[in-house]
Amino acid sequence: MSPSQANGLSLPKGVVIKGALGPRFDEILSHDALAFVADLQRRFNETRKRLLSLRAERQKRFDAGETPDFLTETRHIREGDWKIAPIPADLLDRRVEITGPVDRKMIINALNSGAKVFMADFEDASSPVWANMIEGQINLRDRWANKIDFTEPSTGKAYKLKDKPAVLIIRPRGWHLPEAHIEIDGEIASGSLVDFGLYVFHNAKAALAAGSGPYFYLPKLESHLEARLWNDVFVAAQNALGLKVGTIKATVLIETLPAAFEMDEILFELKDHMAGLNCGRWDYIFSFIKKLARNAAYVLPDRSQVVMTKAFLRAYSLLLIKTCHRRGAFAMGGMAAQIPVKNNPEANAAAFAKVKADKEREAGDGHDGTWVAHPDLVPVAMEVFDRLMPQANQLDKKREDVSVTAKDLLEVHQGTRTEEGFRENIRVGVQYLEAWLRGRGAVPIYNMMEDAATAEISRAQIWQFVQYGVEVDGGTKVTADLFKRCLTEEMARVKGELGAETYDKGRFPEAIALFSQLSLAPEFEEFLTVPAYGKL
């Protein structure tokens, strides 16, 4: 059998599929769809790799003591008087958005949740197991073909789409992530281009015919040059598919520290395709730690004290609102990761009150909408935005009173560093990584729906505490030996919480080994999902 006929697929020249084929995979991995993805890879992969090398070079400068600042060479863009292109009708009211992985039941429940938008996530809420990625594409194609009904095999419960489902936005993987099961001309494919390319090829026209469109959330951007690359990809895809330029619409997550200094420039590069920016708060905290990891002046307090109402997080969220509204773009708020606390009404009420207060801050500040991780939180967030934002959005709230400097964007939260916070990072980080290795990307841990950002914050804080011998509780110095002792004790605790049978069936030995390696490495690993990907 020739490579072009491998696995029963008709493959374009130069394309090799290394993943096993499940039912209906051939519908997604069709000759024409793969040729489309291969064309994108051939045109844009070298630029993608060059931009990743620029990230690494910039990191070396941060490690040497430089801190981020606004760019002098793009001042004319920040000071210029320009607006983004008009936003489609079905994206004008985005007051509550729900996010989650791309498994079939989740997609149906999220589309039916009452939220205005569902972000179907191939990135941080999905473990990039080959089957997860391709089955996700099948599920989304079925959504636009109106055949996404599903019956739970174990219970016989049927799920089907209601009338007026949420608007669908797709989050592809970030520029740094590979798709190792597809090779193009002997090189591993870009996860970004695979996720984007397969979805837009199969669904753009069907989404438009249904009165919506090909809409995307773009993660982990670190510069306007990376936004420019996405814009070039969009233009090429639209030309190849016979779509008018500007049909694709993107919302960019501002979830890296460098991107916060280039918000205007990112909006400008994508202005024909722009729908807004989003405060990706958890990844933003991780990025803050990571970018300044070698700088002892930027060690944060316990994660629970790094809150949106203070310091660099407050500055960045207000700057995002002001920047977006000046340009006619939406300013989306951050994630409420809380999930219902079963069998404990008091704890549940406290969690929901926390969500409500957070959403009141966002709506009051001028955000146009917000994120939740669980369907039960949709009504909580909806009530707040309906009350404080009776109109479709708050583009008229210009926030000209806001003035944010580079110093404000780098202000560290005041607070304490505790052994309990250190131990919690270990417990949460290892449990998330273990679930991720089993193929689950959205994981309920201690009444929060966690995604990869949580594990990243956890191991980043541990790494920094160990590197600097930070004193916790005012006296105990954090060392590698303290980490190892805490790790052993916390894993015993987790085993007790989960039960020995569940614990022993999991992938804890691998998760512990990898988490320990990353936490104690002499050099800070850019993303834990990259070395972990090789173990899936």
Image: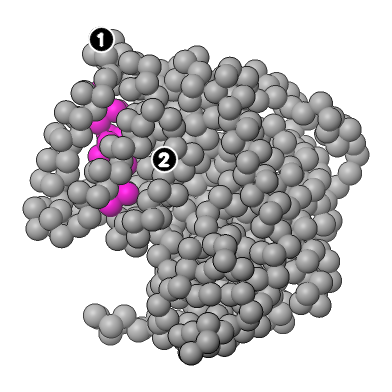
Q: Amino acid at mark 1?
A: Gly
Measured from the top left, where is residue 73 in percent x and y? 84, 30
Instruction: Provide the major secondary structure of the magenta segment.
Output: helix
Could you say which disc has been placed on residue 456 in the image? 2
Measured from the top left, where is residue 440 in percent x and y? 35, 60
Q: Residue at x 70, y 70 (%)?
A: 39
Magenta stretch holds residue 1:
no
Q: Amino acid at mark 2?
A: Glu
Q: Quadrant of residue 422?
A: top left
Q: Is residue 148 above or below residue 191?
A: below
Q: Residue at x 28, y 19 (%)?
A: 478
| Residue that mark 1 sits on | 475
Callout 2 crowding tier (Cα within 10 Å): few <14, some 14–19, many ≥20: many
Callout 1 crowding tier (Cα within 10 Å): few <14, some 14–19, many ≥20: few
Q: Secondary structure at mark 2?
A: helix
Q: Is residue 197 above or below residue 151?
A: above
Q: Which residues are magenta?
A: 419-434
Q: Going by the image, does 514 lie left or right of 457?
A: left
Q: Going by the image, does 198 lie left or right of 488?
A: right
Q: Residue furthest top?
A: 475
In this rendering, does residue 242 appear at all?
Answer: yes
In this rendering, does residue 109 appear at all?
Answer: no
Q: Residue at x 71, y 59 (%)?
A: 44
Q: Is residue 98 above or below residue 52?
A: below
